[in-house]
Amino acid sequence: MSWQIPTQIEQDIIAGKATYRTFQTGNGGQSILPVPANAYVVIFGYDFSPAGGGWYTQFVTSAVGGVNVPTIETARQFETQQISFYTGTDFYPFIHHVNCMNTLVPRSWNESVPDSVDMTQYLRVSEIDNTPIARQVYMTSSNDVTISVGLVKNSFRISSNAIPVTGRTPVGLTYGGSGQVISTQTNYGPGGTPLQFMQPSPKDYQDFGFGLLPSNADGQGFATPDTTNGLLEPSIALQNLGLQNFAACNYYLCLHYALYSKPIPEKQG
């Protein structure tokens, strides 16, 4: 996916009504894009280089019954990463799956039979793909924009239900009436007060026969900060591995936006 300057914004920049700007951040997971007084910004795209690249993890893997069973999953914490923007009035979360590239190489074999394929142990070399991810967005703010970046370690399924047939979940076109038991409540945060991602929707939740809504119910899936069950700040994960000082291992995020040096119009996205 790529981003482009929206036509109207491009025309405003050419006409001198707006200024094209970039905002580059990285390393620590909390940043703020400052917005001058009596002005507003329109963020229309970003380039995100995920955390965790620039190093190779080595996992010893034993051949058990012909199946390679990994013993460590250190790289997995980098495979799902979240970026969110808070404008003081609106919240925009974006979750990205990040590719982990794996290669299996023999670690030991029977040297008396050089051509033997009966390997007794393998070394799995893994690398997080930190190729920049481009995303087209459209966010308007006259306030400073708070940016949070982190690793999504877990998504705990708390309850699952079969979706009944309703006016919003008709049979055949949706899971309504299919009989499949699917996730309807997922935790994305601290154990005591997790964000409860409710599906299909927290609106009229009881209409589906799933009972009362829990506390902290939300219709969007996004992680909230917690080092065990939620959003983990990237530099903490890298510090735990002794990699926090390597630029190649840290995330980088570049915002592309237009700055308008006038109060925000009433009708804006």
Image: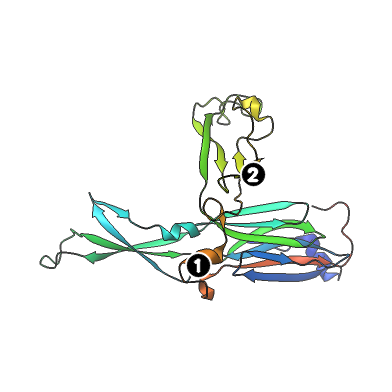
Image x and y of residue 73, in percent? 40, 57
Q: Which mark is residue 238?
A: 1
Query: In terms of secondary structure, where does tag 2 sit?
Result: loop
Q: Would residue 52 be seen by someone viewing this image from the given angle? A: no
Q: Would residue 165 be seen by someone viewing this image from the given angle? A: yes
Give whichever of discs 1 and 2 has the lower sequence position: 2
Image x and y of residue 265, in percent? 88, 56
Q: Which residue is mark 2?
A: 220
| The N terminus: image quadrant | bottom right
* Along the line of sight, the residue nearer the viewer: 77 or 45: 77
At a point 59% along the width and 53% down the height, the residue shown is 95
230 relative to 37, above or below:
above
At a point 20% along the width and 59% down the height, the residue shown is 120
Q: Which mark is residue 59?
A: none
Q: Residue furthest front?
A: 192
At a point 65% along the width and 70% down the height, the residue shown is 25
Residue type indicated by callout 1? Leu
At a point 11% along the width and 65% down the height, the residue shown is 113
Which corner quadrant of the image does residue 9 belong to? bottom right
Image x and y of residue 248, in percent? 51, 73
Which corner quadrant of the image does residue 141 belong to? bottom right
Image x and y of residue 14, in percent? 82, 70
Circle 1 residues within 10 Å: few <14, some 14–19, many ≥20: some
